[in-house]
């Protein structure tokens, strides 16, 4: 029997998949085995180092529960989540290449703090609950041809004025809601101007980042998820233009087209007619969704 040497193990593993019936799975596993083996050879991985790696992955799994997803955080902080988002968007752009119209709104990471089933609120409602600096978010949702999308579901969520999400603090939802666009595709709601905040650093991923010499912070952003029949779902953020960390987001999620001015206004009448007795901000952003391929 021919003995396997350092350069042979990857090909031997790949050769065992001859009976694999799922062509895409086989393609993905073949590349995974190739690259993982190449990585071990490149760094000349020692048994102690690999054991430390396995212990790290074990601890990452053990840190996960219904509210804490340490593996997503690992993928996010290694830039892999954002790479997958960007690949998806590039694939979509290719499919749209021969159709007239504007570019769709860029997507970014969903992150671990989306909580399905947020309360349904009316357009113009305030979900800020006096938490921070009041901000009116408004704009229009259209398709890439500019046609308004009525009744588009718009899920929004953010951290509070200290940068903590509701699910990090307890079991009740706050600073999140679901709205629906009006017949002309318009949306508007009040919340807070989001502040920069650190991703959770009290688990194995935090330890890894500290050892890499990296900070944990994300620039201020409002999460938005848009869904309408006949259109691709969009998961994105609006980033605050004057926020720190726009150039070094811990999860690499910033896209220039998503960075938005938050002008500050003195007390008085807001653009939606509300009378404000303290200064407030506005953030205007128009979204463009991709019509579904099917
Ligand atoms: C967030 O923006 O909520 C987030 C994204 C990735 C990792 C941690 C938090
Ligand atoms: Fe966030």
Image: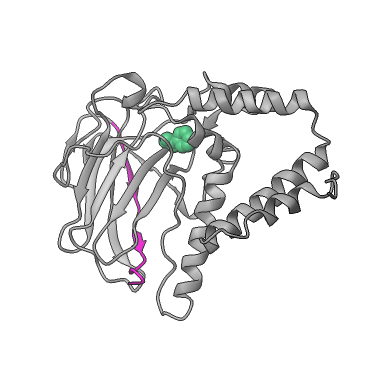
Q: Position of residue 91 (x, y in %)?
A: 51, 66
Q: Is 22 positioned to the left or the right of 167 in the image?
A: right
Quadrant for residue 75, please give it: top right
Quadrant for residue 25, please give it: bottom right
Q: Is residue 75 above or below residue 215?
A: below
* 280 in the magenta segment: yes
Q: In this view, which residue lies farthest toward the front?
A: 1
Q: Where is residue 65 in the image (x, y as percent from the top left)?
A: 39, 26
- Do we see residue 18 in this rendering? yes
* Residue nearest the viewer, comparing 287 with 212: 212
Colour logic: one colour
Query: Residue at 28% across / 59% down in the picture?
Result: 140
Query: Residue at 26% across / 22% down in the picture?
Result: 171
Q: Is 79 positioned to the left or the right of 226 in the image?
A: right
* 199 in the magenta segment: no
Query: Residue at 29% across / 32% down in the picture?
Result: 279
Query: Which residues, given as a range, are shown in magenta?
Result: 279-294
């Amino acid at each position: 029997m021919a003995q396997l040497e350092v350069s042979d193990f990857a090909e031997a593993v790949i050769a065992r998949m001859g009976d694999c019936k799922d062509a895409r799975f086989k393609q993905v596993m073949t590349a995974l085995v190739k690259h993982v083996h190449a990585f071990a050879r490149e760094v000349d991985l020692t048994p102690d180092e690999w054991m430390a790696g396995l212990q790290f992955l074990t601890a990452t799994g053990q840190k996960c529960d219904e509210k804490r997803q340490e593996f997503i955080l690992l993928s996010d902080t290694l830039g892999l989540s954002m790479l997958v988002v960007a690949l998806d968007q590039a694939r979509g752009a290719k499919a749209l290449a021969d159709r007239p119209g504007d570019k769709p709104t860029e997507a970014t990471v969903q992150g671990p703090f989306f909580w399905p089933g947020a309360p349904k609120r009316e357009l113009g409602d305030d979900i800020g609950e006096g938490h921070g600096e009041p901000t009116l978010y408004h704009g229009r949702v259209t398709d890439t041809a500019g046609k308004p999308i009525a009744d588009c579901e718009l899920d929004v969520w953010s951290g509070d004025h200290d940068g903590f999400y509701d699910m990090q603090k307890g079991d009740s939802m706050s600073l999140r809601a679901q709205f629906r666009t009006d017949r002309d595709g318009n949306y508007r709601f009040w919340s807070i101007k989001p502040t920069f905040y650190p991703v959770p650093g009290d688990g194995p991923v935090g330890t890894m980042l500290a050892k890499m010499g990296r900070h944990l912070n994300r620039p201020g952003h409002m999460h938005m998820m848009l869904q309408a029949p006949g259109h691709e779902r969009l998961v994105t953020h609006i980033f605050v233009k004057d926020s720190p960390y726009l150039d070094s987001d811990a999860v690499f999620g910033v896209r220039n087209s998503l960075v938005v001015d938050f002008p500050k206004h003195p007390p008085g009448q807001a653009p939606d007619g509300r009378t404000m007795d303290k200064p407030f901000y506005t953030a205007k952003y128009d979204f463009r969704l991709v019509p579904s391929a099917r």
